[in-house]
Amino acid sequence: MVASEGLAAPVNSAEALLRRLQHQQSRCREIFARQEERLRLAGEGLKIALEQALRSAETVPASASSSDSGLSQQLASLIPTLEAMIQKSGNGWQEPLQQQTACLERLTAELVAVREELASVRNLKEDLETRLTALQQHSGDSEDSWKAREKQLLTQFERERQQWANQWNDREAALNALVLRCSQLEEELEALRREGNGSTQSELQERYNLALAEIRELRQKNAELEKKLARAQSNGPAPGGASDGRILNWEAEKQRILAALESESEDSSDGTLQKERDRIEEIITRTEALLAEKDNEIAELRRLLEEQATSIGSVAVGAAALERLLDQDEVIRQQREHLRQLEEEWKEKLRKAELEISLERAKIARERALLEEKQRELEEKLQALESASASGDKAKPPRGRWLTRLGLNGPPNS
């Protein structure tokens, strides 16, 4: 619309100029008509005057012909003069008439040129209006499509950003839950350690007391066996050497009892005594095994008690013993392995999540840069269209040289 208004101004000025030329042409024609009428009237007046002079000359009487011969000669001399005057007057009127005719022809030619230029200007105006309409329509369609695309991309970006934010929140919540679970497991492990310390100490004390009770019981049984052996020796044949009454240790006493039983088996063939000897040997063997086991347990308990006393006194078991006890516990080993696996899995998940988040951030940055570039291109196109419209309003086509040729550059002279 702005360009069409800019083209309408020179077209209107050309039409006004054409109207002025037509008005000048009509005025010239009126002047020519008046001049021709005046020339025609002057010629008719001269012709009438000559005719009257000739008639008056013919009506002069013959008598006066001789007397007026001088007058006729004067009239005859005046006729060429009058004809020369008439010719001169006609030439004087004919020269302006020719000038006016030449001016009229020139104006007519200029008018034809102006009409042709006006037609070309109108064609150019129609062409420019058509192109402007197509350009405005294309610009409107392109702007609508770019706006729709920009809106679509913004919607997609917002949706993906919300999706990744939700995923990030979910992963953060899962990580917090995992950290909380780890802290709970650590607390449970610490509680198990504290409980294990107390229970291990009480259990060791109980086992130590039981071992002492069993040792006392075994000692009683050994005393009874010694008494039985003494009675058996007193009832049977005397051995090669009598006991000196000294207190012997268990190994010496065992050897003495075995030697006595061997001597009894050699000297006596009683089946009852043989059975009794076998039973006593079995009891001795079991007693030795039990004593060895209890000695080992007592040594282990003493070692543990020494380690406990050197490490934490009477409150906790030594770190080495506790570590061995915890390592021997299958449940604790499984829980430790499970915790280690969970820790590795979550570390791997966190690494993958950080990698995915970095990739998504890079993707979002690229899409944002692309959107900014497209938005900048749209703004540049809009600015170009606005500047083109403004320049169409301000810029006016220069006037043709035919205005200079007609002397119409300045204000018109009436």
Image (cartoon, helix red, strand yellow):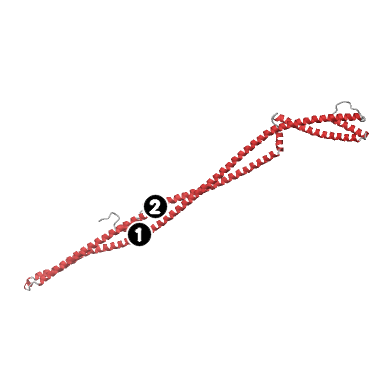
Question: Is 90 displayed left or right of 57 in the figure?
Answer: right
Disc 2/disc 1 C-alpha distance (Å): 20 Å
Q: In the image, what residue type sits under mark 1?
A: Arg
Q: Residues within 10 Å of mark 2 (few under 14, many from 20)?
A: some
Q: In the image, what residue type sits under mark 2?
A: Ser
> Picture coordinates of residue 200 (x, y %)?
71, 33
Q: Quadrant of the N terminus?
A: bottom left
Asked whether residue 399 is in view, the answer is no
> Picture coordinates of residue 230 (x, y %)?
88, 29
Q: Which residue is mark 2?
A: 389
Check the image and name the residue furthest to the front: 272
* SS class, disc 2: helix
**Compared with residue 310, is residue 393 higher up or lower down, i.e. above or below?**
below
Check the image and name the residue furthest to the left: 63
Residue occupying image coordinates x 49% and y 50%: 152
Residue occupying image coordinates x 86% and y 35%: 279
Q: Residues within 10 Å of mark 1 (few under 14, many from 20)?
A: some
User: Based on the displayed image, in which of its 4 quarters is residue 53 positioned?
Assistant: bottom left
User: In the rendered structure, are the residues bearing label 2 and label 1 in contact, judged by CB atoms less than 8 Å apart?
Assistant: no
> Picture coordinates of residue 366 (x, y %)?
52, 48
Q: Quadrant of the C terminus?
A: bottom left
Question: Is 188 displayed left or right of 277 in the figure?
Answer: left
* SS class, disc 1: helix
Asked whether residue 153 is in view, the answer is yes
**Compared with residue 407, is residue 306 higher up or lower down, i.e. above or below?**
above
Question: Is 302 displayed left or right of 377 in the figure?
Answer: right
Q: Which numbered tag is attached to residue 83?
A: none
> Picture coordinates of residue 77 (x, y %)?
13, 69
Q: Nearer the viewer, residue 2 or 400?
A: 2
Q: Which residue is mark 1?
A: 122
Q: Nearer the viewer, residue 400 or 81?
A: 400
Q: Earlier in the sequence, mark 2 or mark 1?
A: 1
